[in-house]
Image (cartoon, rainbow, N blue to C red):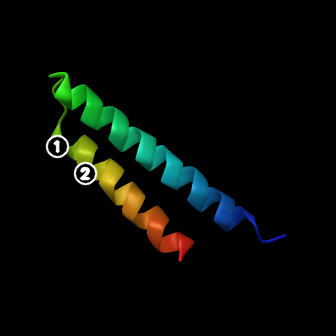
Amino acid sequence: MGFEPIATSFVFFYIAVYGISIVENLGQLGVPFPDWVKDRFSKLKDVSEKEEK
């Protein structure tokens, strides 16, 4: 019915938001993460926000 792109955007958006939150919280606890992990979640969030508009 045409809802698949919208549903996919929401799924990617929430994966990105929770992923960034987990990485930030673990970073505050002192767990080292490579910069590419943070970059990937940020890009995923940006892409999903653009698809929502």
Say which residue label 2 marks: 39
- Crowd class of label 2 (few under 14; some 14 to 19; many from 20; radius 10 Å): few
Give the label on residue 24, or none. Answer: none
- Decide: is 31 above or below 42: above
The quarter of the rendered structure image containing the N terminus is bottom right
Residue under the image location 72 percent in, 63 percent down? 4
In the picture of the structure, the residue carrying the numbered disc 1 is 35
Q: Amino acid at mark 1?
A: Asp
x, y percent for residue 10? 59, 57
Task: Give SS at disc 1.
Answer: helix
Point out the residue furthest to the bottom here: 53
Left/right placement of residue 53 relative to residue 38 reads right
What residue sits 46% from the left and 73% below the top? 50
**Cβ–Cβ under 8 Å for marks 1 and 2:** yes
**Nearest the eye: 2 or 22:** 22
Q: Residues within 10 Å of mark 1 (few under 14, many from 20)?
A: few
Q: Residue at the location (43% across, 48% down)? A: 16
Q: Is residue 38 left or right of residue 53?
A: left
Question: Could you tell me residue 28's position as x and y percent?
Answer: 18, 29
